[in-house]
Image (tube, rainbow, N blue to C red):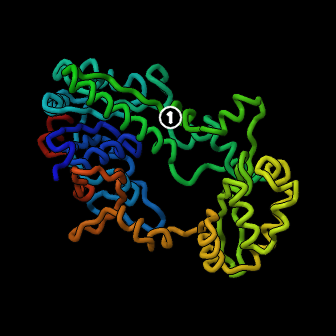
Amino acid sequence: MQSIFRGLKVIELANVLAGPSVGQFFAELGAQVLKVENAHSNGDVTRGWLSKNEQENPEGISAYFCCANFGKQSITLDLKQQRDKEILYTHVKEADLVLASYKAGDAQKLGVDYATLCQFNPSLIYGHITGYGKDDARVGYDAIIQAEAGFTYLNGEPDGRPVKMPVALIDVLAAHQLKEALLLALWQRERTGKGSYVHVSLFDAAVASLANQATNYLNTGSIPQRLGSDHPNIVPYGTVFSTADGREIVLAVGTDKQFQALCRVLGIASIAEDVRFSTNAARVRHRHELLPYLKEAIARRKRDELLHTLQEHKVPAGAVNRMDEVFQNPQAQKLVLCHPHSPYKGLRQLVAEIEGYAWHLPAPPPPYKAPTSSQKTDNS
C-alpha cells in the first residue's frame, strides 16, 4: 500500500501546538516535513516547556514537544538575516505547503508571507494560523481564547470559579480546521494548478466549536451557565457518580428507554415512571430532584460490576480513568508513537483508517540543531 502524500513537501514555520500538529498529520501520511526553527529562541518554544517530572536533555526535546513533532526534519534559521532567508526561499521553490503561525503582520516583516513566497512558487499553498485574524496583531494563546470564546465561563462547578480546560483544545480544534482547509486547497490545485492562501484563526475555530451551547443561547436568549459535568439539554448525561469502592463513573443516558433500563439496573424502576423523570424534558426540569436518587443507588455498587451490568443492558456508561488507566486499553495503545531506538513517545494525529492506503510511521521528533559556526559568523 502507498502513502497518500508521498512526495509532498511541507515547510513548517509554526510553533507550539496548532501548526505543528498539522505538520505531523502530513508526516504521518508520508509527506516530507521540514520544520524551520528560530535561532534566537533555541527552536520551538515547547522544547523548553518541561513538566515537573522532566529534566532538560541535550537534544532539546520535551514531552510537550513530542505531542506534535514526530516525523519531521529540522533546520535552524535566523529569518532576519538575508543569508538564512535565501536558504528558506530555496526550499520554498520545491515545496507544496507552508504552515505558518505568525501573528498578523509579522510574516510580512520577515519576508515569509504568502505574497512573497508565491513569487518563488506560484503553486504554493500557504496555511496560516493566527489568534484573532489577519488584521488583528494580538498574540493568540489557547488559554486566553478559551476564556474569550466562552469555554472557561462554562467550565467548572455551578458554585465555583470558571476553569480552563486541561488540554489546549482550541489549538487542537484550529488545527483540524486548517487540515480540512489545506486538503480542500490541495484538491483545488489538482484541478487548477494554482496555489492559494488558507487562513484559520484560533478565535473563529473556538466559537465555531461551541455547538449546542451557542445555539441554546442564540435560539432562546438564555445565557448558559456552569453545570459541572452535567449537560444542559440531557439528564443524566456527563454526570460523575461515585461508587461503593471509591471510584467514579459517568453516565450518558440519551433516551427515555435507556433511562428506564438504568433505573431497573439500579433497583429503582419506579423512578422511571415518576412524571417528573419519565421524559428527558421532565428530567432536565427536575434534575436536582433526580440526581440524589441516582447518586444513592450508584453509591451502593462497585464500579466494574456496575459498568458490566449497565453495558449488558445497553446503558451508556464509562469509568473515569486516570492517564495510566487510559493507556492500559489496547485501543489507546494503538495510537502511541514509539520507536525501538528512541526514548520518546507521542500520539498519532491521524486515527482514521483509509482502505488501500498506508499510514506512515513517522520518525521520532528531531533534536534541536544549533546554527552552524558559519551562520553565527555571517549573521552576527
Residue 138 vertical position relative to residue 49 in the rendered view, above or below: above
Residue at (55, 69) in percent of width and height: 322
Which of the 4 image quadrants contains residue 114?
top left
Residue 213 seen in the current view: yes
Residue at (36, 40) in percent of width and height: 19
Q: Is residue 201 left or right of residue 278?
A: left
Which of the 4 image quadrants contains residue 143?
top right
Q: Is residue 246 left or right of residue 330?
A: right
Residue 16 image offset from top left, x and y in percent: 40, 45
- Amino acid type of the residue that numbered disc 1 sits on in the rendered structure: Ala
Residue 40 image offset from top left, x and y in percent: 31, 41
Residue 135 vertical position relative to residue 232 in the rendered view, above or below: above
All told, the count of numbered labels is: 1
Report the quarter where the C terminus lies.
top left
Residue 288 versus residue 365: which sits nearer the camera?
288
Residue 75 seen in the current view: no
Name the secondary structure under disc 1. helix
Write down the residue under mark 1.
205
Residue at (36, 38) in percent of width and height: 179
